[in-house]
Image: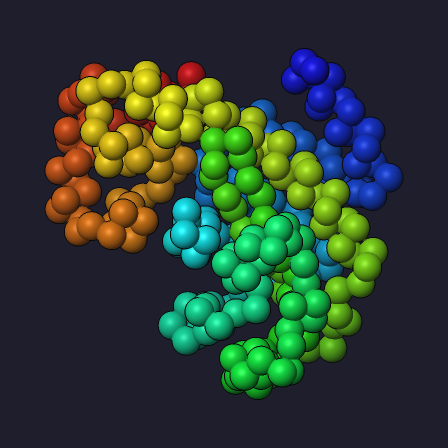
Amino acid sequence: MKIDQKYESLSKLLRGLLPEAITEKTMETQFSDQSLSDLGLAFGSCAGALLASTGWVTYVVGPELKIKHFLTSNTPSEEQKDYEKHFAAIDPLSPAHCLARECWVTTLRQMLSPLVAEHATYQTQFMQRHGIVDALEIFLKSDADIILGCSLLRHGEAPEFSRRDIEKAEALRILGNFALARTFPRHQASLEMIIERFPALTAREATMVQLVAAGLSNKQLCRELDISLPTVKTHLLSVFRKMGVASRTELAARVLA
């Protein structure tokens, strides 16, 4: 199916579930040049509005199904820092828990079990502390094996996410997957294709090229690759030389052109 036909089919499919204004706003971002942070911002803000969330966070999922780094959010910084430092490892909606079960859209109330000690700790020490009523997780995956997560939160007197909310989230996930695949297509952004197109690169450098093309900063590269900032800069200089580019912008243009 041609891309325009697929796009039109998706448009018709989603109109029954997504308000027209949000559908069109989200679709407009699919064909623009953007980094993962831009895409995370567009998806998170639209999902938050569509599902009446009081907060949302988007992040990148690493190959070991852990949160590698956060992209964008509108949640209080204190809440996010508390989560990162103390509770990410026991979150019932962590990528490892959800994706191991092929749960690409699910709610905290669906996954939370009072019989699991860690879940009880998460509920009493994190959720209650920050007034979180429920959370809904949406995972996007491109055919270049890039996975993005989006956490939608409800605080205070807000109701738990309903079955109808989950249906809307499933529809939005289809749209998000399409946007992610359009932005970082396999034939351009997969590690296999980067290695094939730029054979002078080492395996580590090819990984760095994929991440730079996706818009990661030097600090994010440090965390993603578990290396120091000086090492990142050294690798980047080598990558620029081998690819014949002088900047991140030129690198991304070569990979995604």
Q: Is residue 14 left or right of residue 76?
A: right
Residue 78 visible somewhere in the drawing: no
Relative to 156, say whether 100 is above or below: above
Relative to 245, say whether 41 is above or below: below
The spot of residue 11 in percent (x, y) is 77, 29
* Residue that extends furthest to the right in the rendered view of this protein: 16
Q: Quadrant of residue 207?
A: top left
The spot of residue 237 in percent (x, y) is 15, 31
Q: Is residue 82 left or right of residue 118?
A: left
Q: Quadrant of residue 106?
A: bottom right
Q: Of 131 and 120, which appears nearest the observer?
A: 120
Q: Is residue 238 left or right of residue 194?
A: left
Q: Of 137 and 241, which appears nearest the observer?
A: 137
Relative to 40, say whether 114 is above or below: below
Q: Image point 21% across, 29% down: which residue?
A: 202
| Total marks in image | 0
The spot of residue 24 in percent (x, y) is 73, 33
Residue 194 visible somewhere in the drawing: yes
Q: Image point 72% across, 50% down: which residue?
A: 169
Q: Quadrant of residue 245?
A: top left
The spot of residue 257 in percent (x, y) is 42, 16
Q: Image point 68% across, 75% down: which residue?
A: 133
Which color scheme does this rendered protein use? rainbow
Q: Of 217 and 224, which appears nearest the observer?
A: 224
Image quadrant occupied by the N terminus: top right
Q: Image point 43% across, 56% down: which residue?
A: 66
Q: Is residue 45 left or right of residue 1?
A: left
